[in-house]
């Protein structure tokens, strides 16, 4: 399938970003406090950030990260999504054997594509996008649907060629808790191809993004070396991640990045460090999907920059 790769990946601030930020606040604020007066104050602060962000044309990612940091500090709550993440992980672990049996029924490139379908299904466990509502009860059906429909922006043959051409070190930049469990079939394919994997989670809690605590005791620890970004932030913002993460990234032979926040942040680091990445996600936001030459609802496996 022909893939129209963007010359640059940039996610600008657009008017529709306001709905996503407000939607995230409506979910977040009750998790931070049940005090009605404090909830009103948090929403007021959120509206102020939004107004100032639009006035200064601040891109959506740094705007939301700065806002979340202030609200977390204000509430004195470290991980408001802890219960949501625990439930997501439990459900994903429960369905993993069925998903994995399907993936193992294929071989070669088709096994890789089935593993990618599982990983994309995991990317539906996203509680921070206005146009998307995750349903943990339908994850198996979602996986089967992706498997049947296929990958819309499909660079999986390039990933397969890269895995088979040589062995090396893959840095796998993870996304949400629960989603991590459905990355396991893909991690197995990569390991079986002879690659060493470093699986990177967040350096601290941010929405339902996965941290070390969220994958502790899972098979991921057997399949990969675990590292973190050094930042409590969506994606890998260059101004917040640790030097250790930057060194890890610069030494990678290949990078795999899950989810929309990595689309918003990783391309800047790619340009600085000269690394190639495969982006794996469901396009759940028009703005981010368009940045990848795709549309909302697309299943995406995109190599960037292109060959």
Image (cartoon, helix red, strand yellow):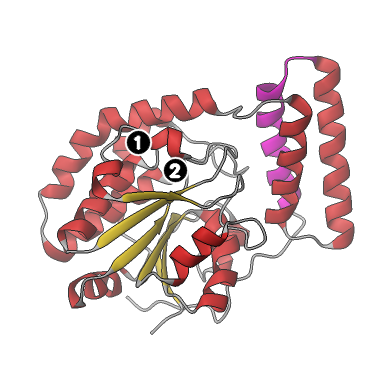
Q: Which of the marked residues, 2 or 1, is nearer the chain's N terminus?
A: 2
> Which residue is found at the position 43% from the left and 24% from the top?
87
Q: Residue at x 59, y 62 (%)?
A: 265
Between 78 and 71, the residue placed more toward the observer is 78
Left or right of 226 on screen, residue 111: left
Residue on which disc 1 sits: 139
In the depicted structure, whether residue 209 falls above or below residue 85: below
Tell which of 281 and 61 is nearer to you: 61
Q: Position of residue 240 (x, y in %)?
A: 65, 56
Residue 255 location (% of width, % of height): 40, 66
Q: Are marks 2 and 1 in contact (CB under 8 Å)?
A: yes
User: Where does the magenta region start and end?
Assistant: 17-35
Check residue 124 in the rendering and tell me which mark sits there, or answer none. 2
Q: Position of residue 115 (x, y in %)?
A: 25, 52
The Cα–Cα distance between marks 2 and 1, rounded to whole angstroms, is 8 Å
Residue 50 visible in the displayed image? yes
Dominant SS type (magenta): helix
């Amino acid at each position: 399938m022909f893939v129209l790769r963007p010359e640059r990946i940039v996610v600008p601030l657009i008017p529709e970003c306001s709905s996503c930020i407000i939607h995230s606040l409506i979910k977040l604020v009750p998790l931070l406090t049940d005090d009605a007066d404090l909830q009103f104050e948090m929403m007021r602060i959120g509206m102020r950030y939004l107004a100032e962000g639009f006035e200064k044309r601040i891109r959506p990612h740094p705007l939301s990260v700065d806002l979340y940091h202030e609200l977390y500090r204000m509430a004195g709550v470290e991980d408001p999504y802890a219960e949501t993440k625990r439930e997501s992980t439990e459900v994903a672990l429960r369905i993993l054997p069925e998903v994995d049996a399907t993936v193992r029924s294929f071989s070669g490139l088709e096994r890789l594509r089935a593993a990618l379908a599982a990983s994309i299904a995991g990317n539906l466990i996203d509680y921070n996008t206005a146009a998307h509502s995750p349903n943990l009860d339908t994850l198996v059906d979602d996986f089967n649907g992706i498997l049947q429909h296929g990958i819309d922006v499909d660079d999986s043959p390039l990933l397969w060629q890269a895995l088979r051409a040589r062995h090396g070190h893959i840095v796998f930049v993870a996304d949400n808790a629960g989603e991590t469990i459905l990355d396991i079939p893909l991690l197995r394919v990569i390991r079986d191809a002879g690659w060493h994997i470093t699986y990177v989670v967040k350096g601290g809690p941010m929405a339902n993004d996965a941290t070390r605590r969220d994958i502790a005791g899972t098979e991921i620890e057997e399949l990969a070396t675990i590292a973190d970004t050094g930042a409590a932030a969506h994606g890998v913002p260059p101004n917040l991640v640790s030097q250790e993460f930057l060194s890890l990234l610069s030494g990678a032979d290949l990078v795999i990045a899950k989810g929309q926040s990595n689309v918003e942040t990783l391309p800047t680091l790619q340009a600085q460090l000269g690394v190639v990445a495969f982006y794996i996600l469901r396009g759940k936001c028009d703005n981010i999907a368009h940045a990848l030459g795709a549309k909302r609802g697309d299943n995406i496996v995109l190599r960037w920059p292109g060959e």
